[in-house]
C-alpha cells in the first residue's frame, strides 16, 4: 500500500531535513542599519569611521540572525556608548552587488532627539569622531547614496510614511 500523504505528514523528520537542505542553498543577504539621531537644533549625528574614507550615519552590519532594530541599538551602544530605544523604521534600501559585495538590505531607523546637549564620543576604535552637523551640510560629508537615504529618512520622519529605496532612490 502506497502512502499518498505529503512528506511533512508521513515523515516529519525527513521533511525537516528537506527544509534544512533547501535553506542551506538559499542566498544570504547582508543586512545593515543606520540610525537618524538629531539634537535639539535639528542637526544630525554623523560618524567618521576609521575603516572607510567618508563620514556615515551611526550604525553597522547585523550579526547572524539578529533583527535590524536590535542591530541598531547594539551598534549605538558599542560605537557611541548610547543606550537608546530605537524608534520606527524610516527607510529600507536595496543595494545592488558592487565590488566584492553581494547585494544587501540597508535599514534606517529613527533614533530620536538626544536628550543631552553633550556630543556622543566614540566608545570603541571603529570611529575617529562623531559630530552633529546641520542637515544640508551632511550632503557634502556623506557618499551620495547615503545622503539619499538620509534625505528620504528625514522625509519619512516628517510625513510618517516609510520609504522603500533601490540604490538610494524611490
Image (cartoon, rainbow, N blue to C red):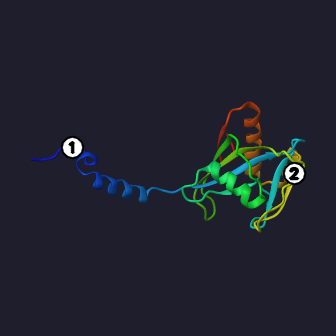
Residue extending furthest top? 159
Q: Which mark is residue 15?
A: none
**Residue 66's spot in the image, x, y percent?**
58, 54
Asked where in the image residue 47 lies, by quadrant, the reply is bottom right
Helix or strand or loop: what does disc 1 sit on?
loop
Quarter placement of the C terminus: top right
Q: CA distance from mark 2 to mark 1?
A: 62 Å
Does residue 140 appear to the left or right of 103 in the view shown?
right
Identity of the residue drawn at 89% across and 52% down: 118
Does residue 15 appear to the left or right of 158 in the view shown?
left
Helix or strand or loop: what does disc 2 sit on?
strand
**Residue 131's spot in the image, x, y percent?**
86, 55
Badge 1 is on which residue?
5
Residue 1 or residue 149, whichever sits in front:
1
Badge 2 is on which residue?
132
Up-down: is 57 above or below 129? Answer: above
Amino acid at each position: 500500500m502506497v502512502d499518498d500523504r505529503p512528506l511533512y505528514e508521513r515523515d516529519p523528520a525527513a521533511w525537516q531535513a528537506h527544509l534544512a537542505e533547501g535553506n542551506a542553498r538559499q542566498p544570504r543577504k547582508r543586512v545593515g542599519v543606520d540610525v537618524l539621531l538629531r539634537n535639539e537644533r535639528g542637526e544630525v549625528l554623523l560618524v567618521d569611521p576609521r575603516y572607510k574614507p567618508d563620514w556615515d550615519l551611526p550604525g553597522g552590519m547585523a550579526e547572524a540572525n539578529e533583527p535590524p532594530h536590535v542591530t541598531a541599538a547594539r551598534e549605538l551602544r558599542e560605537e557611541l556608548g548610547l543606550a537608546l530605544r530605537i524608534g520606527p523604521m524610516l527607510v529600507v534600501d536595496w543595494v545592488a552587488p558592487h565590488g566584492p559585495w553581494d547585494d544587501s538590505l540597508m535599514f534606517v531607523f529613527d533614533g530620536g532627539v538626544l536628550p543631552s546637549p553633550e556630543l556622543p564620543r566614540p566608545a570603541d576604535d571603529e570611529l575617529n569622531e562623531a559630530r552633529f552637523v546641520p542637515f544640508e551640510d551632511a550632503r557634502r560629508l556623506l557618499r551620495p547614496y547615503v545622503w539619499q537615504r538620509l534625505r528620504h529618512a528625514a522625509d519619512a520622519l516628517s510625513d510618517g510614511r516609510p520609504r522603500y529605496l533601490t540604490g538610494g532612490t524611490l
